Image (cartoon, rainbow, N blue to C red):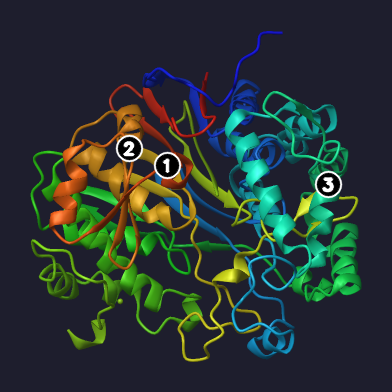
Amino acid sequence: MLNFSAHEYPYPSRRQAVFARNGMVAASQPLAAECGIAMLRQGGNAVDAAIATAAALTVVEPTGCAIGGDAFALVWIKGTLHGLDASGHAPAALSIEAVKRRGHDAMPLYGWLPVTVPGCPSAWAELSRRFGKLPFATLLQPAIDLARNGFPVSPIVAHQWKIARHKYAAWLDRQPEVQTWFETFQVAGRPPQAGEIFCNPAQADTLCELAQTQCESFYRGPLAKTIAGFAQATGGLLSEADLAGYAPRWVDPIKANYRGYDVWEIPPSGQGLIALITLKLLEGFQFDHRDSHQTWHRQLEAMKLAYADGQHYITDPAHMRVTAEQLLSDGYIRQRRALIQEHALAPAHGDPHASGTVYLATADAEGNMVSFIQSAYHGFGSGVVVPGTGIGLQNRGYEFSLDPSHSNALLPGKQTFHTIIPGFISKGGQPVGPFGVMGGYMQPQGHVQMVMNLIDFNLNPQAALDAPRWQWLGGMKVGIEQTAPADLTMALARRGHQVALAHDLTSYGRGQIIVRNPDTGVLCGGTEPRADSHIAVF
């Protein structure tokens, strides 16, 4: 065999935008994208393709999502955009007092305590029930085959797998329940390497049961009993009642009009509202050049203001102290926009009362389009894997605050502030297309940059994803990718930003975009160069 590294690329390369007419799936994993396009070839629609791709991603990219995670979707079908919120809530026994009794002053990152009720399987089943064309079992079969027969691990996933193992090893003494991760996700006592075959027969069995029961077993059946039984035996608070009481919610997407285009997001507790606030702030400026320090400075300042409000106010909608409409109101936006001057300012939230993972995109020949995102949160999630099932559980509860006065304070049964967000653009009642950028707090920042790349700077979907990115890192700290123009670092520093050059490009988000030509129906797709991404077409 030739002796080469799958991680080293000494010469620059360029991807081309991809065009197709009958269907398209853009995802961070080639094998998963091909699973989705196979559904279109079998007569399925964009929803079927999204479900098959999402299920396959839990197998081939377990570093970013899991059956035991959460999901959101924006679905354009028959001329209407629908929103699905399949995020979970805190178990009934999880409270601030319960966490503190176990010796924690803040929510731990790993182990049982940050585990919330998973919503991902319910998203697959609900999307299929309402909008799918093919039998549900058909949609999960490709993922079952990949888990049972194995798949070659891709380079970026192998890199992230290695990082995850190091992190979980550091937590073993404090959270011994993460030992189950090592028992499930290692090969001969180590993470799999790029190109090495990895099999997960336990996950294949679980996917079979989900396929046969349309995911009912996960919430009110044998799998639910297994999950809850393991929790009870090892110190977890997740119960059969927590699982049985869960159901996803159809929600009305929220939007902001940006230069004549409607940009859509899922409403809180998701952080998509932050992207919309930022775009509304930036609409008051004119941008003639993408890679100028003036453009980047204003983008960063707007993002800081939006995040300051988002992190202060966004939580479970039942506990929000302000509404999305208040935070997006013209008067409040003008008030906040006036704070954006020529020098960087420290972010602080305002008062509107005084005027507050993995991503995929699919499209079919009928004009249906899906923007879908699912996540286990930090890498593989909590590190807790239910023995014999291959089910990794998310650590979404890490976002809760143990300060009772905080908007996002932990309460039993409450949804936490949520980072994963799908995006969608329309104009004049017609779909432009789905877009998304996964990666924790980078997501609304990536959304803003993708929207502006497409609308302000007229970049095609692939160029919009290729372009160098910025990222607010908290306080006065900002990061920019090494591919950005060299003069930007010093120019931003002169404006008061504390600038760091990025060394790990995977922390700057991984996105997908599909745009539809309303006159011809031709689809144009771009896929993330910072991941093992792929666009499958039909």
Q: Which residue is mark 3?
A: 184
Decide if residue 77 is in sight here: no
Q: Amino acid at mark 1?
A: His
Q: Which residue is mark 1?
A: 503
Q: Amino acid at mark 3?
A: Thr
Instruction: Work out whether residue 312 or residue 499 is closer to the camera in this orientation and state it.
Output: 499
- The location of residue 457, given as percent across then percent down, is 18, 36
Q: Is residue 352 above or below residue 45?
A: below
Of mark 1 and mark 2, the one earlier in the sequence is 2
Q: Is residue 175 above or below residue 492?
A: below
Residue 211 as seen in the image, left or right of residue 450: right
Residue positioned 29% across, 72% down in the render: 325
Q: Do callouts 1 and 2 mark residues in contact (Cβ within 8 Å)?
A: yes
- The location of residue 276, given as percent across then percent down, is 30, 59
Secondary structure found at label 1: loop
Using the image, tell me which numbered label, if any, was put on residue 482. Answer: 2
Secondary structure found at label 3: helix
